[in-house]
Image: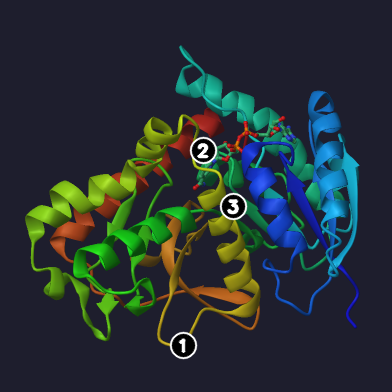
Amino acid sequence: TQAPVNVTVTGAAGQIGYALLFRIASGQLLGPDTPVKLRLLEIPQAVKAAEGTALELEDGAFPLLAGTDIFDDAKQAFAGTNIALLVGARPRTKGMERADLLEANGGIFKPQGEAINAGAADDVRVLVVGNPANTNALIAQSHAPDVPAERFTAMTRLDHNRAVAQLAKKLNAPVSEIRKLTIWGNHSASQYPDIFHAEVAGKNAAEAVNDEKWLAEEFIPRVAKRGAEIIEARGASSAASAANAAIDHIYNWVNGTREGDWTSMAVPSDGSYGVPEGLISSFPVVCKDGKYEIVQGLEINEFSRTRIDASVAELAEEREAVKKLGLI
Ligand code: NAI
């Protein structure tokens, strides 16, 4: 059998952490043949709660779980890590300006980037979930110069899955029949879920929908504002669905996307589709042999172009803002 893969989860005592850890321990992150060792990072005040979760993990008697260690120090938490799930972040609170939010998160993601640079395994893969995810990923990446830049990614998979589900519902099709949907840009309200290349049971989905009003006035805002809809209904933000998306993101990155499909990941731009190089923006990606590649050569129509550009412009502004703050 294989040696355990080290998986670091930050914000482990939070609500996404609670939904995520048991699924990792059960083998859903990497597959049923891969043992995992969990390394949980929390702030000192939340270490006790993380210890409680670790007791429950023990009580799961998961055959694939080789152990759980808890840290309040980033250097230790990321030492030897192969998969780093950066979930813990500073949420926006009332009256907080964007610069304050970025600065507070810089205080988290800069030292975490440094710790990954200092001690993570050579094959480390990083997924940033904590918001503002794309820009937090950029901050961490810029403090990890020895780690290949493309190993830093941010999560738009929840948006992707939400879009797949809404499209399937509209077309009265099973979700498994939806392929090649794309989330472009930022994980924010400006994101653009694109169905023009999507397929439903092998046919073009935009043609099958044939309803631009639904697309512009229902589908796109519904997906973009789904987080608010969940908060309104649940009284708390998306947690299990976010954890599920994090599992999907890493599972596909490591084990590949299915034949004839792609997924959405926010990854450092190589300049594809006019997205300025280096911005961590969501793209259609195919994963194979443990690597992802941005799908090339898609035709972008006018409807999509405007929306992609708007979301990418927001990312460029965030990058400027963190540059000004000296965070990158
Ligand atoms: P939560 O507030 O329940 O948990 C966050 C945890 O992070 C807390 O336990 C806190 O103690 C911990 N934490 C804070 N600073 C830390 C640090 N420096 N090191 C380690 N741990 C730290 O929040 P929840 O619901 O689990 O969400 C976590 C993040 O994920 C939020 O930023 C949220 O906005 C984001 N999110 C992103 C989604 C996406 O699609 N990209 C979807 C849903 C949530």
Label 2 secondary element: loop
Label whose residue precedes the other's in the sequence (3 or 2): 2
Tally of numbered tags: 3
Q: Which mark is residue 82?
A: none
Q: Nearer the viewer, mark 3 or mark 2?
A: 3
Disc 3 residue type? Ala
Distance Cα–Cα, label 1 vs label 3: 24 Å
Q: Residue at x 22, y 58 (%)?
A: 305
Distance Cα–Cα, label 2 vs label 1: 31 Å
Q: Nearer the viewer, residue 275 or 253?
A: 253
Image position of 212 (left or right of 274): left
Classify residue 46 by image quadrant.
top right
Q: Residues within 10 Å of mark 1 (few under 14, many from 20)?
A: few
Q: Residue at x 26, y 63 (%)?
A: 169
Would you say residue 127 is visible in this rendering?
yes
Residue 197 position in % (x across, y down)? 26, 74
Residue 101 position in % (x across, y down)? 54, 24
Q: Residue at x 46, y 18 (%)?
A: 97
Residue highlighted by disc 3: 243
Disc 2 residue type? Pro
Q: Which mark is residue 259?
A: 1
Would you say residue 274 is visible in this rendering?
no
Residue highlighted by disc 2: 132
Q: Quadrant of ligand 1?
A: top right
Residue 286 position in % (x across, y down)? 48, 77
Classify residue 272 by image quadrant.
bottom left
